[in-house]
Image (tube, rainbow, N blue to C red):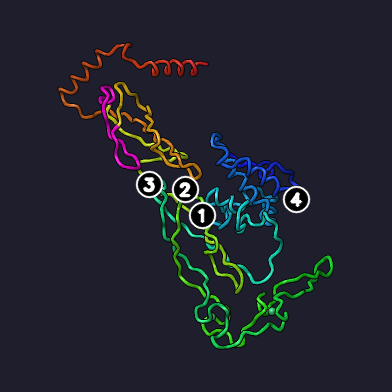
Amino acid sequence: MAKRDYYEVLGVGRDADDAQIKKAFRGLARDLHPDVNTDDPDAEERFKEAAEAYEVLSDSERRATYDAYGHEGLRGGGYQPGAQGFGSFQDIFDSLFGEGGGGAFGDIFGGGGRRGPAQGGDIGVLAEVELGEVLTGVSREVAFDAVVPCEHCHGNGAEPGTPILTCETCEGAGQVRQVTRTPFGQMMRTGNCPTCGGSGKVAETPCEVCAGAGRKREAKTYEVDIPAGIESGQQIRISGAGHEGETGARAGDLYVQVDVAEHPDFRREGRDLITVVELPVTTAILGASVPVPTLEGEEQIEVEAGAQHGDSIKLRHRGLPGISRPSRGDLHVVLKLITPVKLDEEQRELAERLDSSLGPENEPRAARSGLFERVRKAFR
Ligand SMILES: [Zn+2]
Ligand SMILES: [Zn+2]
């Protein structure tokens, strides 16, 4: 299906300002919350659509790209942390209406420009999970390189035992006024002090290990809880587990992008699973109890006499939970009838006798009407 226009999704004009975009999204987010829309199966998808539209249109750089090149322009560039930065609905709502307010949606509270030392960067990692783990949720250790505080100087950038002085350039303010020449004339702007990086302090003798940065690169691991019902491509944001920021600033976030491995037996359709079971024609004629795979091991199901090729048998609640809905979907067992080959003399005779004994009364009703319907359509 073609992607809808982001402005259309949020119901705002192309000239809408940030406040209008924010207001439109907040309204939609409240209306479409999956918890209040348990009987609307489309709410979840529409919510995701709105969240994605908001993420792009609330970011002036990405909005400009979208305005100029459309959806195509936002593609490419590979995997971008935060590009679809939502792990769970709760996650989104916490950042929207709840505490914290950091991350991709943090700016909904306003807040304005950054002041002071720079925040740490975000990190993106991949985590692969099995389909069976989607059923229960799983804890997975992810490994990545991150900037961490320097242990030698405890992150303050000064060689232990040496003083930390007030920055002379900014006199401890961390900010300096800079005059920039632009085509529109001189612009005055306030920026971080180039000497101290915004902290207002400098080490008299920089730390030997980190050369005064207060931070260094290190291999790290993180035990991430992947919730039941997660889908391929969804991300989990772990606030503050990214790169360490400059002294006094918050760390970046860790985005774990989940990839659900293909399963040889099951295809996933939302919360439902589909599996195909092969059955000899003769077994389908007679009916039988046959074993079928489920995520929790083999289970016997009853196939009624006269089952047809392509029939599907539903095992309720043997599918997967949704990320926002704990109740499980169904497992659909599709029958694939197979014809026995290499018959010996006796088997062939039996088959011939059965074949010649069959009359119109043995034809399944559905198959007959289906055939007539197809013939009628072909001649129309
Ligand atoms: Zn150090
Ligand atoms: Zn300074």
Q: Which residue is mark 2?
A: 230
Tell me the residue at 42%/60% (across/down). Answer: 141
* The N terminus, quarter of image: top right
- Horizontal placement of 252 versus 111: left or right? left
Dot 3: within a 10 Å radius of its alpha carbon, few (fewer than 14), some, or many (20 or more) residues? some
What whole-number distance in Å separates the C-alpha atoms at marks 3 and 4?
45 Å
Which amino acid type is shown beneath numbered disc 4? Answer: Asp
Amino acid at pointer 2: Ile
Question: Could you tell me the amino acid type at mark 1?
Answer: Ile
Evaluate whether residue 44 shows in this view: no
Residue 52, x across and y down, in percent: 61, 48
Marks counted in the figure total 4
Q: Is residue 294 magenta?
A: yes
Label 3 belongs to which residue?
Answer: 132
Residue closest to the far front: 99
Q: Amino acid at mark 3?
A: Gly
Question: Image check: 287 left or right of 322?
Answer: left
Which residues make up the magenta segment? 281-300
Comes first in the chain, label 1 or label 3:
3
Circle 4 residue:
17
The image position of residue 63, as x and y in percent, is: 68, 52
Dot 4: what SS?
loop
Q: Read off the residue under disc 1.
A: 236
Q: Residue at x 59, y 67 (%)?
A: 250
